[in-house]
Amino acid sequence: MDPSSGAARTPAAARLSANAEEKESEAARSRFQLQNVLGKGAYGTVYSALDAASGEKVAIKIIPVTDQDREEFKQIQREIAFLSGCNHPNVVRYLGSYRHPSELWIVMEYCGGGSVSDLLSAAGEPLPEELIAYICGEALKGLAYLHGLGKVHRDIKCGNILLTGAGEVKIADFGVSAQLTNTMSKRQTFIGTPHWMAPEVIQESRYDGKVDVWALGISAIEMAETYPPRWNVHPLRVIFMISRDPPPRLQQPERWSPVFADFVSQALMKDPKQRPTARYLLQHRFVMSLWPGVAAGLQPLIQRATQYLQSTAASQPAAPEAPPELRDLAGLATG
């Protein structure tokens, strides 16, 4: 155990802990039947699974755990226990977690429509503006709710905005991404890409939920252009560009309404003091002017995305380890 986390466990305590984990592992493996791979990433692999206790389909994120991570992952489990009590239609429900000797299982609500990133991959083209407005508005509702609880996501992007088969929008990984980033960065492994990071995160300044508003603004551009700004630039260079350059804008503003362009510019105010909160941005005309039934326009795209996921899930590669020159950047993701 890391001395900073407290006194070392006695051999007897270690054996008790190992026995408890083994029982927890057996309970989880007997309760949940893993099915298909939904995705792979820097933190682990996500599977669809059947909950034998309820008959409900769920999603399970399985994360490798080493002995040195054990205390950090206990903190993540405490966070999941808290989030299990959260209830909002635009936030993926956490259903609990299970420890295994070498893994942590995080059980979540299953969203059968995939992610907005899957939607873009399946469509191969930008989303219509009214669907971008709908997705942003629903995501802002979830962000406003969770920011009210004092939670900051730090990893908002199209890949973490999920859809149900009915077109409901739900934020995933809320409250856990930041702690996973902290834990993984201790392994000197580069986590993710910096394209969605707010300037204050990169500058290691104090920050709040407005970093998620910035990331949603980048995600809005991602939906409009199929890639985030600077997607083809080396991550190290992206970090310096975010700090140094003016905020990104829509590359072809003539294709979009002025109100959409204004929404993006508001979300991407470089000075966080000037940037609106999620709750304030919910009053923006871009997300206020939607008509009932707009979510129905997602149905054909969700069907295409589902087919896309079925054809690619089994062959998705694991996230590659970053080259040595990028590993020092891992700390920048921890804020």
Image: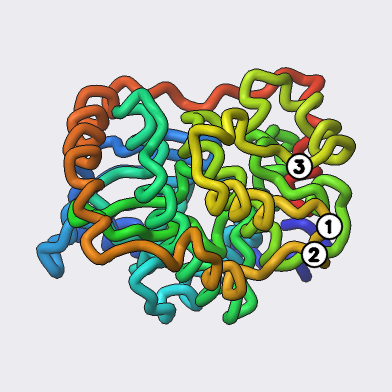
Camera-side residue: 103 or 132?
Answer: 132
Q: Amino acid at mark 2?
A: Gln
- Tell how many labels: 3
Q: Which residue bears the numbered disc 3? A: 247
Judge left or right: residue 169 versus residue 311: right
Disc sitting over residue 274 in the figure: 2
Sequence order check, earlier mark of 2 and 3: 3
Q: Which residue bears the numbered disc 1? A: 271
- Secondary structure beneath dot 2 equals loop
Residue at left 19%, top 56%? 166
Q: Amino acid at mark 1?
A: Asp
Picture coordinates of residue 273, whole percent (x, y): 82, 67
Residue at left 21%, top 23%? 311
Is the residue marked by circle 2 packed among few (<14), some (14-19), or many (20+) residues within 10 Å? few
Mark 2–mark 1 distance (CA, rounded to whole Å): 5 Å
Picture coordinates of residue 310, whole percent (x, y): 20, 30
Residue 227's place in the image compared with 159, above or below, is: above
> Which corner quadrant of the image does residue 281 belong to?
bottom right
Picture coordinates of residue 220, whole percent (x, y): 53, 45
Q: Does residue 254 appear in the picture of this structure? A: yes
Q: Looking at this rendering, what residue extends furthest in the left direction?
A: 55
